[in-house]
Amino acid sequence: MSYLLSIDQGTTSSRAVLFDRTMNPLAIAQQELAQSFPDDGWVEHDAETIWQTVIGVCREVLQRTGVAPRDVAAIGITNQRESTVVWDRATGEPIHPVIVWQDRRTVAHCDALNAAGHAELVRERTGLLIDPYFSATKLAWILDNVPGARQRAERGELAFGTVDSYLVWRLTGGRHHATDATNASRTLLFNIHTQQWDAELLALFDIPAAVLPEVRDSSDDYGCTEPGLFGHAVPITGVAGDQHAALVGQACFEPGMVKSTYGTGCFIMLNTGEQAVSSNNRLLTTLAYRIDGVPTYALEGSIFVAGATVQWLRDGLRLFDDAAETERLAEQTRAGSGVYLVPAFTGLGAPHWDPRARGAIFGLTRDTGIAELVAAGLRSVCFQTRDLHRCMEQDVGLGQGRLRVDGGMVANGWLMQCLADVLGQEVDRPVVRETTALGAAYLAALGIGWYRSLNELAASWQCERTFFPRMPADIRESLYAGWQVAVERVKSERDLSPRCATEHALSLAG
């Protein structure tokens, strides 16, 4: 058994990557995943479609490589975090579409909890803020809005899980209802200090304990797949949320090491070791991973929209046909362009945490064209990264260390150079860019003894290219100052409703 199969179930696609014994990716299969938007700020997936795409890509990657399922030593799973599934324990049928992490339907619930003074308790126990981003209020919404769901949940007839838990359930034929500590740490229900579901938090969010999965290590026994799925029962020995898996795949095992992942959103994570550091800048304290029962902690900043900006420019505005064209288009612009795109399509994440903010474009002039809009969209990712990096510097004193990057967007050389310029520091792009899938495979490999320690894993990490900052400091700071002004103008404290906008215009005219 010389291969590892990594399942990477993301927000916009499901992927499978087959790794050989030396952890080189042999083949990748991918299927896009449609999202639905049934109301303003609502984002949903179909759970059955997630399942079918996952099985489809797993079978495809095995078929393309000719690898027999019996030669797969283990499976690792990594997943979009916080997205919430509730299903019937008897039938496995979901009772409602998956509520995706981007969904903002529970803003009012979160506002009420914050107004009631519960924010500090939640932050002390979970390291998180009370925000629609996390799973607890999504779960409560399903229980309150699906007829009979709360009563069935209290009777133990329903199961809750993030996508990893749902996949483990389906893969094992319902024999294992389990999640890993990293995914549990994103629910607002898990005490990251005691490493247990927290009874007081369950009461606060009105969640019956009977729906919760068992919490296991990130490298652990999650059972074996049903033999009929692939023709052979394969053990599942690694599970982690996508950003935690990326941290593992980037071999950021020492305190102070930082990685940033650029997918649908952008997530920057700093390893803080055995210490759960509390941020003074509204960053999240979370689990990096848990191995042999020992938690390692991290600080994290979340950007809700990164690659989704490019997707919007392509599909919404139809400015280009393929995301690969963005590099060529951006290269046509001048460095000091004053066009800013603030992609607050689903609110602003860290450090602002403003769910009501909405996107905007500033600085348009008569010579603004497609290239300038594309460059502004790409720069917004770099500026948001700097927002988070600056917060981490203030919290723990990062200094001028290196940033390890991964995700689909890092293939864009212009973007990576822009990132180095905006940060004013070196940016390392790894040889294996499938770091999220690689991290899941690493965890699975640890689970079957292919590696004896994290140090062995760290020795295998390789850098493909380092991007060095080239932009003069005065231009860098001027551009960033303009970004900060643009962000302040989209925050929800500025009431942009038609009535208020009209009144403001009349006051100016008067």
Image (cartoon, grey):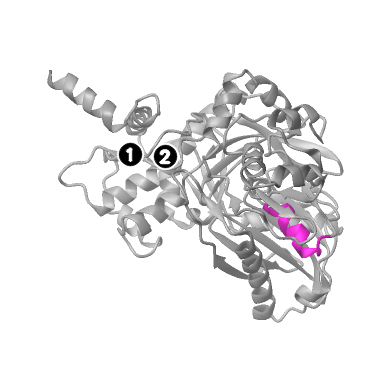
SS at mark 2?
loop
Question: In the rendered image, which residue does mark 2 sit on?
Answer: 344
Q: Residue at x 77, y 67 (%)?
A: 21
Question: In which image quadrant can residue 432 be found?
Answer: bottom right
Q: Is residue 424 visible?
A: no
From the viewer's perspective, is 106 left or right of 149? left
Which tag, 1 or 2, sits closer to the chain's start? 2
- SS for dot 1: strand
Name which residue type carries label 1.
Ala
Q: Is residue 167 magenta?
A: yes
**Camera-side residue: 34 or 148?**
148
Give left or right: position of 104 versus 247: left
Q: Which residue is mark 1?
A: 360
Q: Quadrant of residue 275?
A: top right
Q: Amino acid at mark 2?
A: Ala
Q: Position of residue 507 (x, y in %)?
A: 18, 19
The Cα atoms of the two marked residues, 1 and 2, are separated by 8 Å
